[in-house]
Amino acid sequence: MVVMLLDDNPDIILLMRMMVTRILSHEDCQFLEGRNGQEGIDMLTTNDQVPELIISNFRMPQMDGLTFFQQVRQNAKWADIRLVMMSAHPSGDLVQRVAELGAESFLRKPFNMADVEKAIRGGSHN
């Protein structure tokens, strides 16, 4: 499984990589990692591997997670990518907008293993 992780905090990327690897231990996971939505778009357009799952922070420099998800959903070849948004300060409006874009889950920071597993396996708009 190819998983894209986007966050401007490298510690969050590392933590998420460890959690996803543990949750999906029965699968061979490959990771694409970036610091913002623009890097995510660049990876999607230049990389032969299309991720099955993207976990993105909301607040990032250059391009935030919401704008990134909007651009992902505008491209038909990325329509089947599962999306999960995370944020330390989500508003009800943001959670609703992310859901309208077809994201499966919204992770509130700080998150724990159970939160991440629920988001990856089943999806929930908390």
Image (cartoon, rainbow, N blue to C red):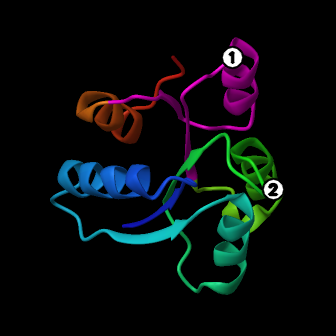
Q: Is residue 94 magenta?
A: yes
Circle 1 — which element?
loop
> Percent from the top left, x then y, of residue 85?
57, 39
> Percent from the top left, x then y, of residue 96?
71, 20
Between 80 and 112, which is closer to the camera in this rendering?
112
> Percent from the top left, x then y, of residue 49?
53, 80
Residue position marked by numbered label 1 in the rendering: 91
Side of 2 where 76 appears, left or right: right
In the image, the segment drawn in magenta is: 82-111
Between 46 and 100, which is closer to the camera in this rendering?
46
| Amino acid beneath label 1 | Ser
| Amino acid beneath label 2 | Gln
Residue count near mark 2 (Cα–Cα under 10 Å), binned few <14, some 14–19, many ≥20: some
Q: Is 43 drawn above or below residue 104 in the view shown?
A: below
Q: Is 105 drawn above or below residue 53 in the view shown?
A: above
Instruction: Name the residue located 68 percent from the left edge and 63 percent from the top edge.
Output: 78
Assess whether mark 1 and mark 2 are in contact (beta carbons under 8 angstroms): no
Residue position marked by numbered label 2 in the rendering: 71
User: Would you identify the image quadrant in which residue 80 lies?
Assistant: bottom right
Q: Is 89 drawn above or below residue 92 in the view shown?
A: below
Between 49 and 108, which is closer to the camera in this rendering?
108
Q: Is residue 54 magenta?
A: no
Instruction: Name the residue located 36 percent from the left edge and 67 percent from the top edge.
Output: 1
